[in-house]
Amino acid sequence: MKKRPHTTIVLAMTVDGKISDRQGTAARFGSAADKAHLEQQVALADGVIFGAGTLRAYETTISVSNPLLLQKRQERGQPPQPVQIVVSASANFDPQWRFFQQPVPRWLLTLANSQVSHSDRPEFSRIVRAPGHNAKINWENALKQLSQLGLKRLAILGGGELVASLITADLIDDLWLTLCPLILGGNSAPTPVGGEGLMQIAGKQLQLLEVKQIEQELFLHYSFISS
């Protein structure tokens, strides 16, 4: 039996596999249906994880506002909002960003040897520290800690480096991918999975669970096949 939360990646990408343009602009190419889908997935989670780069790009996060989704959370015994967990070694953020004004619980996930403290970043109600190597978090340890803190379901919202770290460590259960009718191109434009990449022989195998089409977008649901 796994001693970690259930993990779901939720991303939108262009037809050519980009999650942003070459300048790393906040991706806003998803439709209203995609935004509703994202909120639905967030509403199922106890915690939402995203990297520092994602926060810097958007300066905000998605919270649960749909009354029906809020009601379902209450029926499941969940608080109104999932915990918003930012991954960062330095926590070098502007406290004036909208994220820090939103009525959501905020945690910081950082390296065990990080010098960031509550006095430095009082906006975060909890700082979770995980061991690491070469400035990279030990995700197995981090997820185990989050499970011990009561988080049983996590939604992973990016960016590509964070997603790559979790996939490489075999710590992802399923993936929701929205395919949007847009092409951006660019060698430097980020993709859903960054990092060094895997050789074909070591690639992660997926099983397609569901396909939905809403107007011009496709919503693809995959599970990860255990290696």
Image: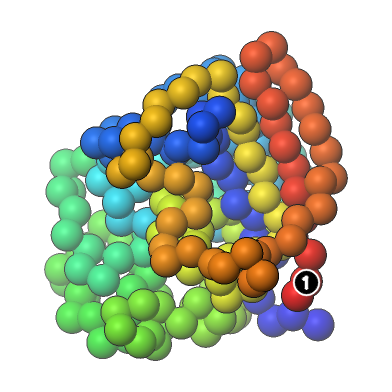
Q: Is residue 48 visible?
A: no
Dot 1: element: loop
Would you call the spot at circle 1 few (<14 residues within 10 Å), some (14-19), or many (20 or more)? few
Q: Quadrant of residue 42?
A: top right
Could you tell whether 68 is left or right of 20 in the image?
A: right
Q: Residue placed at 35% from the left, 47% from the top?
A: 54
Residue 144's x, y, as percent?
A: 58, 81
Residue found 66% across the figure and 70% down from its top: 201
| Image-based side of 190 in relation to 167, left or right | left
- Residue position marked by numbered label 1 in the rendering: 226
**Which color scheme is applied?**
rainbow
Task: Please name the amino acid that badge 1 sits on.
Answer: Ser
Check the picture and name the quadrant holding the N terminus: bottom right
Q: Is residue 66 left or right of residue 191?
A: right
- Percent position (x, y) of residue 222? 75, 49
Considering only vertical position in the picture, is 122 above or below 29? below
Q: Report the residue that reaches farthest toward the front.
A: 200
